[in-house]
Amino acid sequence: MSTDRRRQVYDRAIRKEFSFLKSTDSIAHLHAHSIVIADGDGLLVPLCELHADDAELIATLSEWRRENSRAFPTQFPVTVEGTRRWLRAGVLGVEDRLLFLVCDRHGRPVGHLGFANALAGDCQIEIDNVVRGDKEAQPALMSAAMQALVAWGEEMFGPREIHLRVFEDNEHAVTFYERLGFDVAATHPLDGSAKPVWAWLRSNDAHVMLARASDPVVPDQQGVLFYLYVPDVAGFRQRVVDAGIAAGEIQYPFYCRRGEFEVTDPDGYVAMVAHT
């Protein structure tokens, strides 16, 4: 398939599937359109028309946005009405953005994550708005949700790459990713502060975005798992070890037959390195 043809197929699939999921307006269809997390640990439920007038959910989203506002480069006062407008215009009204509620095994929303800018690049998708709203949610649920999202995106759309968003708060996080081969492309400080609240790093076609966390970072409570995709897992692991970073052994689970290994960054986030 030619590059242009592949791009056309990819763009059409993004528009069709994102629009289809966001147009859901009944609870029966919503359950059918949700993505199962792991072995029934929870669901990824697409934010859709059914939620546009759900006052209780909008209030919850507003609270989550308020609690995590400092993790975003743009600072703004968070209100329920503002969140309602954001849901309508900033999520449902954007054709290449799709947000999922992360629901636990009882169906209770505990956070959200999704995709954005899916039509902005060459068959690339950016992981977007990873927020753990309920800090007491079942352990590792956000990690499993991230894996389910990435697996679904790869199966449905076959993107050339997936950009990563990582929520961190210290300069040592930037240093850690530099040692993995990333270069700082841009940073953004808050007004009146010399320290960056946001940083963008890149290594060829791989991108990592770091944002300052709103709460103290506790290494053993990080509930998000991030994937880095490389063409040579064994070779990249050797580079990591040579850079002085502790790396796990290469494992070969059923969903990653060419192997994967993990590294842990200074704030306790686990990055899985797998084959493209």
Image (cartoon, rainbow, N blue to C red):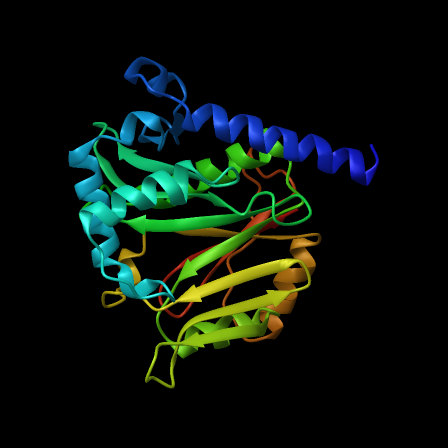
Q: Nearer the viewer, residue 181 or 91?
A: 91
- Look at the image and tell me in which quarter the N terminus lies: top right
Which percent across, then down, holds residue 152?
Answer: 51, 32
Q: Is residue 78 left or right of residue 71?
A: left
Looking at the image, which residue is at 25% across and 29% down?
Answer: 105
Looking at the image, which residue is at 58% across and 41% down?
Answer: 252
Looking at the image, which residue is at 54% across and 38% down?
Answer: 253
| Res 213 → quadrant | bottom left
The vertical placement of 20 against 212, above or below, is: above
Q: Nearer the viewer, residue 63 or 172?
A: 63
Residue 272 can be seen in this image: no
Which percent across, then down, holds residue 250?
Answer: 57, 51
Which percent across, then down, holds residue 41?
Answer: 31, 31
Q: Is residue 8 left or right of residue 266?
A: right
Residue reaching furthest top? 28
> In this figure, what is the number of numbered marks?
0
Q: Is residue 28 left or right of residue 215?
A: right
Residue 154 can be seen in this image: yes
Which percent across, then down, holds residue 34?
Answer: 39, 25
